[in-house]
Amino acid sequence: MQILWFLFAFIAVLALIGLAAWLVRRFAGNRLGANTNRGRMPRLAVIDAAAVDGRRRLVLVRRDNVEHLLMIGGPTDIVVEPNIVRASARDQA
């Protein structure tokens, strides 16, 4: 009798966890982990990426108004070209 009570309680707890997960996914949507700096331009972004070969990729990363060209995926990751200033930032300076 005690084993049946344990199994019933265990199944009920699993059902409640599943229901809670479904409710969070249903109603929270994309708001979880959303950026709280609304209206601000993000400071870090991947602008473009291109495959060099099967393992390596060239990635253009923007930080503030400066872009960096990186080669990633090989035995070592390297910075190909640092401090590429965007045209809009260059015109203001």
Image (cartoon, rainbow, N blue to C red):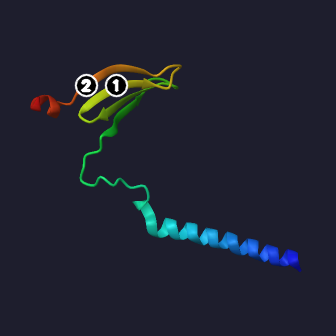
Snapshot quadrant of residue 1: bottom right
Q: Which residue is mark 1?
A: 69
**Relative to 12, is 25 on the left or the right?**
left
Which residue is disc 2 drawn over?
A: 84
User: Residue pushed farthest right?
Assistant: 1
Tell me which residue sits at (16%, 32%) in the image.
89
* Rendering coords of residue 40 (x, y %): 24, 49
- Find numbered disc 1 in the image and state the secondary structure of the residue it sits on: strand
Task: Give residue 13's quadrant in the image.
Answer: bottom right
Q: Earlier in the sequence, mark 2 or mark 1?
A: 1
Residue name at image x 15 percent, y 34 percent: 88
Q: CA distance from mark 2 to mark 1?
A: 8 Å
Where on the picture, by quarter, is residue 66?
Answer: top left
The count of marks equals 2
For the residues bearing labels 2 and 1, Cβ distance under 8 angstroms: yes
The answer to whether residue 71 is left or right of residue 16 is: left
Q: Which mark is residue 60?
A: none
